[in-house]
Amino acid sequence: MHISKLQLVNYRNFPRADVLFKPGINTIIGENGAGKTNLFRAIRLLLDDNMLRAAYRLDEGDFHRGLGDWRGHWIIISVEFDNVSKDEAIQSLFLHGTGNIDGDDIGRATYNLIFRPKASVRANLAELEEGDVDGLSDVLSKVTIADYETIFTGKSEANFTDPDVYKRLVGDFDVVLFPDASFPPEIGGKIPGIMAVSKEVCFTFVQALRDVVADFQNSRTNPLLTLLKSKSGEIDPGDFASITTMVETLNTAIEELPDVMTIRSDIRSTINDAAGETYSPHGLSIKSDLSNEADRLFQSLKLFVGEAEPGYEGAIHELSLGGANLIYLTLKLLEFKYQKAKQSFANFLVVEEPEAHIHTHIQKTLFDRLNYSDTQIIYSTHSTHISEVCNVEAINVLGRNGGACEVYQPSIGLGPEEIGNIQRYLDAVRSNLLFAKSVVLVEGDAEEILIPILIKKVFGVSLDELGVSLINIRSTGFANVAVLFHDQRIRKRCAVITDLDDAFIDTAVDPLDDDADKKAKASALAAQKAGLERKTALNTFTSGNKWLSAHFADYTFEVDFLISGANSAKVVSVLGDVYKSAPTIAQAKAELENKDIAVSGTRMMNMANRLGKGWFAILLGKVVDHHTIIPSYILDAVFAAHLMPSTEVWANVLAYRIRLQEKDGLVGPTAIAEVRGALKTYREGAINFAAMRTAMLKALPGDEINEVLADF
């Protein structure tokens, strides 16, 4: 038996979400604040018997803030199980509780936590006339969290995340139309607490490893004590009798130490002298309180581990963070093994961010080895090294959309060949796209190296600050990865950057051409043909998909960089690092400055090919500054992925440009003061972007950033 689906409605940062799971290992990934911890807490509320009963009593803070007013709404957490075993005891539990009967046996089961208004509130809502907005406001104004109840149900057939179903079960707050207060059969039958599924399954939760040393020092959270206590209940009293005798003998020996007996006598005599016989205690002893009970004795046991030095074992606090976390994780896994051995009918291991402080090799090894039989494992992770080895069909990606969190399944709607292509592409570097807010895909090393430098130098903010991940596909097979970004799959923006490879040399056949000329022309024509075919294919592929866009260099990245603005001067400045001969440098300079692209473009590509495109990009990166012009197709791609930057981002960009203009000394202090004043009012919201753009153009007319601002 395994969890096949988790549905969340109005729970914390999830307005509505469907999380799909496979048997075996599953992975939850997403940026910070995307809801991974809340998702795990939802699962635990249904399946973790260690959760305090008080946790089931939700409060207003558990409602999704996007509701505005939570009053009257429901929180629904629903788990669907699949492949329910035909074992008689298991079938009996689900038959009376959560089973959805198909034929003679139960194969699928649902188990739901519903936090809803009590019947009296639901009745008041049902009595409202359709459209009675004032009446609704009056009813809701009197509702408090004390008017809510938590119920568990099973055998539900409702698709809770369907907005129409929600309106039918809960009510339509917009038109003021509510159902009667009866128990709708769609939400299933009510399950008594004594029949909780959590009591029948093996469920272990390993929390994020943030402060392991503190957990070891806390008797409630110490995983070693948990293991020892579980074992102490299995010890035969007869086997423990000899230890009890030794403890009692030790207690007596401590009490009979001469110094102990002397102090006891001195206490008695001193209190008698002070208070007199009448008011003094009738008895007074000093006794050793060393317990002879197994679980109390086990609390005195500590774990010592040898990490670095042979022959030396230190306490947990002496270990490295990674070493301590690995020991903690090991003990939690052992706790799971002990629990699993109790013959539960389903086994679930939920691990939150196991990678903290752990070496990348260990991360991948852990993921590979934690594959217990008859166990469904669910990870959450920030590690690209773990996501690299995940099965893409068992990944759920969490993303933030404003104040709401959404869940995406990357493989939904794809065939085996497409899934296989994605699986091969998503190595530790490329799998970063699964964690990104938005993505730019490039085809080569030069773009991967130089584009982030260009953005940082020109805008003063990094691609990371913009929330853009740049991924090098190392080929032109963009569709193999870009297929992920779709309404059905990952609903995040992705821009593709590639070369059109238009020929910039004369490709006409000339009888006087030598073999080298013929080869160059043939190569240019072939590249141009492939570029046009690639453009047609990508435009077709992205058509109608609001999450995808394609952007093309007219020629190649290097040539388009050269001919953008005054960038040729930047290229000329690195000639000494490419060539050693003075005549060659002089000739190359003349060619790079030539207005004929056939001349300048050829020299540019010769330099790139001479060093290798990646190394040449590194060389150019050293001379890029705020005067460098970013090719327009690259800017189009970055802002297609990121859309319109926020006011705060633009303000930071413009403040950076103002500082540099002031440092360059190209404008006077009056203009600087004026534009800083405009920037202050822009930050405060007193003027809009258009007004700020005008202020920049007026005060700093020579700043290259004005051309970029004009496009917004």
Image (spheres, rainbow, N blue to C red):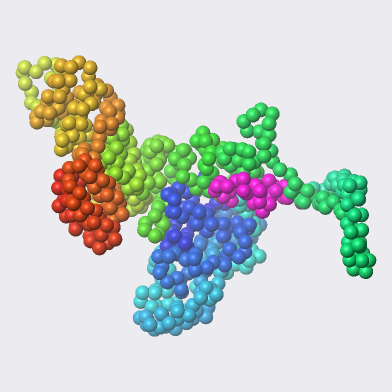
What residue sits 49% from the left and 68% below the top? Answer: 60
Counting from the top left corner in percent of width and height, residue 67 is at 41, 68
**Quick check: 521 left or right of 331?**
left
**Quick check: 221 left or right of 452?**
right
What residue sits 43% from the left and 49% below the top? Answer: 30
- Say above or below: 451 vs 32: above
**Quick check: 506 left or right of 223?**
left
Q: Which residues are magenta?
A: 205-233
Q: In terms of depth relative to the viewer, which is nearer, 186 or 66?
A: 66
- Say above or below: 557 vs 518: below
Give the image quarter of residue 634.
Answer: top left
Q: Is residue 181 visible?
A: no
What residue sits 21% from the left and 24% below the top? Answer: 575
What residue sits 16% from the left and 22% below the top? Answer: 588
Q: Is residue 230 in the magenta section? A: yes
**Residue lying farthest to the left in this orientation:** 511
Counting from the top left corner in percent of width and height, residue 144 is at 51, 76
